[in-house]
Image (cartoon, rainbow, N blue to C red):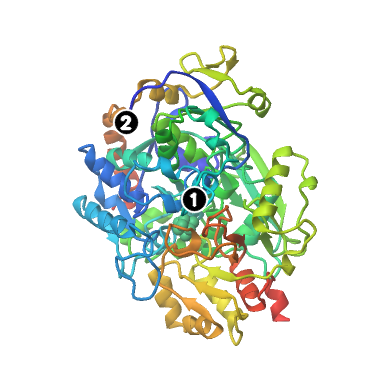
Amino acid sequence: MSARTLFEKLWNDHTVCQLADGVDLLYIDRIFLHERTGSISLISLEDAGRSVLNPEKVFCTMDHIVDTFPGRTDKTTMQGGRDFIEMTRKATNNENIRLFDIGDREQGIVHVTSPEQGIILPGLTLVCPDSHTCTQGAFGALAWGIGSTEAEQALATNVLRMEKPKSMRVSFDGELPAGVTAKDMILHLISKYSASGGVGYAVEFSGSAVKSLSMESRMTLCNMAVEFGAFTGMIAVDKKTIDYVKGRPFAPKGELWEQAVQYWEDLKSDNEATYDKEIIIDVTNLSPTVSWGTSPGQSIALGEKIPSPNDFEDKNQRIAAENALSYMAIKPGQCLRDLKIDAAFIGSCTNSRLPDLRRVAKLLKNMKVASGVRAICVPGSTEVKLAAEEEGIDKIFMDAGFEWRESGCSMCFFAGGESFGFEERVVSSTNRNFEGRQGPKTRTHIASPETVAASAIAGRICSASEIEG
Amino acid sequence: MRGLNKINSRAIPLLRINVDTDAIIPSREMKKVSKRGLSEGLFAGWRYLSNESRVLNPDFILNDPYYREAQILLSGDNFGCGSSREHAVWALHEYGIRVIIAPSFGAIFYKNCIRNGILPIVLNEEIITKFDNGNININLEEQKINESIKFEIAVADKEMLLQGLDDIDLNLKYINQIKSFEKIDRKQRAWAYL
Ligand code: SF4
């Protein structure tokens, strides 16, 4: 057999049959839903008199609409949010789908909970009506976001009709400097190759810098593949992957585990495999990277100056830069470091896992959030929250002046409930800095959790090394 | 879903890049578990001067009375990027948009269009910016704009739009293949089944 990429292996092993004109019928192993876009798939399926073919492979969580205040109930700050919660509960119950509900240990942001519970496994296909499903490609799996109608298709038939994307390899080579994280790597990639640089491609992240990342950081990297415009992101299986999965509640056990590991060990690209496109990035000179504009592509290293629209050759990029500068209320030539902030947010499916919180806690110890800065931490899942509390991380956050919340998407996006204020400047460990993403006219700068924590302490945008002295 | 073939209409030039689905329909506008009642929220952040008063922003192109009945939208690179929310497409459809022409689209958004009776056309930016503000004529069957400009679309997507087909019906035609794949796969990848 000729040399194949990881992506080709995953794709081929799930191809039920090839239809005309380059369309393949792809088998789907797991479907994840959440109360915001998943509920509508179930209800619409029921309305059409159809049902879920294999409920045991479907999971659902409450993450997007639920409040994250301590002591939360079905009631939400978002008007009408209760409806989503109740309808999701009813629909999953009707269809015998496992729901991770408010108060359950397994509840959390879908892309945090799924790996934690061993629902995503290497070699699986997993879909969810949520664009950041690519996060789970970190496990050597094919995981991607779909629309609600496509979710209905997968639920009712176990397959999706798909056109095969092209393949791209992004190699991050070299050793990451201290204090530089997976978040900085991905922001750097997107700023260099644009928010549409990955359109049409399934992207494999590889190279020595990726190999050295923890599973959690690999998820951070894959999480933003969609911000690069890619169909999805993925990383080859290695020992770290298998160690992470072992013993998780829904992971295979006993003899099945042995079979699985045997299969997983081949989940990497063959040496001679070729890609439609290759990008190589040397990470040895990377530094903390932060967005200045309203697209993740509009990011710079903290030491750089905010660009002028005239710096862009492309007319569209120029107009986009003008709009972004005006929305963000900043000027060309300014330094991000000079920008005072109103709030700091640590959370989201990008950066809210236990190692993220541990790294931040180290920085926050014996420090205080600058006065006038509202700082919030929302653990990615109830499991993460409980584990962090066991280690006393919650205390460190609260002593520093952070709010410590229940898990969920929270203010990663504005659902119509809670938000940061009008024209407030927020440094956020999330993945999107779109206009209005965190609230009407809110100005979001996305960055690593370290940068967010350091900025919270300094009251202006800065990197961890600056406050460490 | 009704099939779509010929559209002749004015085209709204929303010529900016990276129009994301949060901009097409802000989250706060998705108030109910429903595919309907969303057009009010279409482009809400740009369309209204303030969210509370809902006074129309006269500078926003959609509010130009000249384009009130337009069924075609012209835009820049990477239209519909970002969140997977299908509400973006439902809102556009309910508003009356049937065709979107842009140099490229967000992948999930593109598929959502096909499944909901909106034709996404990928076209060179130079051609898009040259359309004047008169009517544009789209013929999906012939894959032509104004009878001369050819556009590409996957055959399967074209069929779905022309006939207004449903995914599930289409897949169920292959139910035997699906079943036999599963039978073999359950032996080969037993660990993958719950
Ligand atoms: S945390 Fe944010 S990006 Fe992630 S799934 Fe939730 S809303 Fe989406």
A433 w.r.t. A10: above or below? below
Q: Amino acid at mark 1?
A: Cys
Q: Is residue A359 above or below residue A291?
A: below
2 and 1 marks on the same chain? no
Q: Which residue was labeled with disc 2?
A: B171
The one nearer the camera, A116 or A348, is A348
On screen, B115 above or below A432? above
Name the one closer to the observer, B57 or A420: B57
Residue at image coords 54%, 68%: A345
The chain holding disc 1 is A
**B162, B178: nearer the viewer:** B162
Q: Quadrant of residue B164?
A: top left
- In percent of width and height, residue B93 lies at 42, 33
Q: Is residue A454 above or below residue A19?
A: below
How far across and down, in percent of the image, does residue B184 sit?
A: 30, 39
Residue A352 visible in the current orientation? yes
Name the residue at the bottom extreme: A366
Going by the image, does B12 lie left or right of A415? right
Q: Which circle marks residue A82 in the picture?
A: none
Dot 2 amino acid type: Asn
Q: Which residue is mark 1?
A: A134
> What residue is at 42 percent from the left and 50 percent from the top?
B29
